[in-house]
Amino acid sequence: YEASPRTTVRITVNAPDQMLELGRRLAKLLRAGDLVMLNGELGAGKTTLTRGLGEGLGVRGAVTSPTFVIARVHPSLGEGPPLVHVDAYRLGGGLDEMEDLDLDVSLPDSVIVVEWGEGKVEELTDDRLNVVIHRAVGDTTDEVRHVTVTGLGERWAAVELGVLSA
Ligand code: ADP
Ligand code: MG
């Protein structure tokens, strides 16, 4: 028995622009076929992080919180993979609606980022980045966020996530 490879980094983010910068940095580690799961309460900064990621990937359109759609595809402005941004908040617990998105079809050629993906997208691949964003406990005005990034599976086994906190 071998424990699955796992790398973790914890980053303290002090303001929204730092969250954008973290997203831009994270983008440099990503390539087609990568899945990123974002977890954290409403207003934690998941969409803000994804916006920075979209900037870093160089995709078309600003990443926003989708109002009428669950998934939005941002094509690359260059040679890179498109960003598929999913907000699974309104999706039921069942896998049916998720299956309708055909993320398995898009994944090989895309970077897929899923907000609220816990319990919904794990079956797509064993390789993924889990990002958890925490607000300082009991403080809803503070801009400090604690971000934990964990790489799961062979894909991330040898990737140095420390560059994210540099
Ligand atoms: P989520 O997608 O997790 O619901 P959003 O990114 O849509 O969160 O919203 C986060 C809100 O919190 C924004 O209004 C943003 O300006 C604010 N905010 C304050 N501090 C931070 C921070 N350090 N990182 C990200 N967002 C922050
Ligand atoms: Mg959001």
Image (spheres, grey):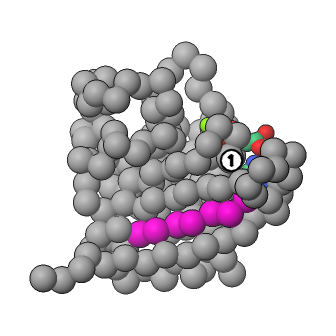
From this viewpoint, which residue is outermost toward the top? 68
Residue 12 lies in the magenta-colored region: no
Instruction: Let me know if residue 81 appears in the view.
Output: no
From this viewpoint, which residue is outermost toward the left? 1
Task: Give the percent coordinates (x, y) of residue 117.
Answer: 42, 42
Q: Which residues are magenta?
A: 145-151
Instruction: Let me know if residue 118 appears in the view.
Output: yes
Relative to 26, say whether 93 is above or below.
above
Task: Give the percent coordinates (x, y) of residue 106.
Answer: 31, 40
From this viewpoint, which residue is outermost toward the right? 141
Quadrant position of residue 2:
bottom left
Q: Residue, x 33% and y 55% (percent of image)? A: 33
The secondary structure type at the circle numbered 1 is loop
6 horizontally vs 86: left or right: left
The answer to whether mark 1 is within 8 Å of ligand 1 is yes
Relative to 92, say whether 43 is above or below.
below
Residue type marked 1 = Gly
50 horizontally vs 73: left or right: right
Q: Which residue is mark 1?
A: 45
Q: Residue, x 34% and y 43% (percent of image)? A: 119
User: On the rendered image, what quadrant is the C terminus found in?
Assistant: bottom right
Residue 148 lies in the magenta-colored region: yes
| Count of numbered circles in the view | 1
Q: Nearer the viewer, residue 162 or 145?
A: 145
Q: Residue, x 63% and y 63% (percent of image)? A: 147
User: On the rendered image, what quadrant is the N terminus found in?
Assistant: bottom left
Task: Give the percent coordinates (x, y) of residue 107.
Answer: 31, 47
Examine the residues drawn in magenta and state their main secondary structure: strand
Q: Quadrant of ligand 2?
A: top right
Q: What crowding class fits label 1: few (fewer than 14 Cα within 10 Å), some (14-19), or many (20 or more)?
A: many
Q: Residue, x 55% and y 16% (percent of image)? A: 68
Task: Give the percent coordinates (x, y) of residue 90.
Answer: 48, 24
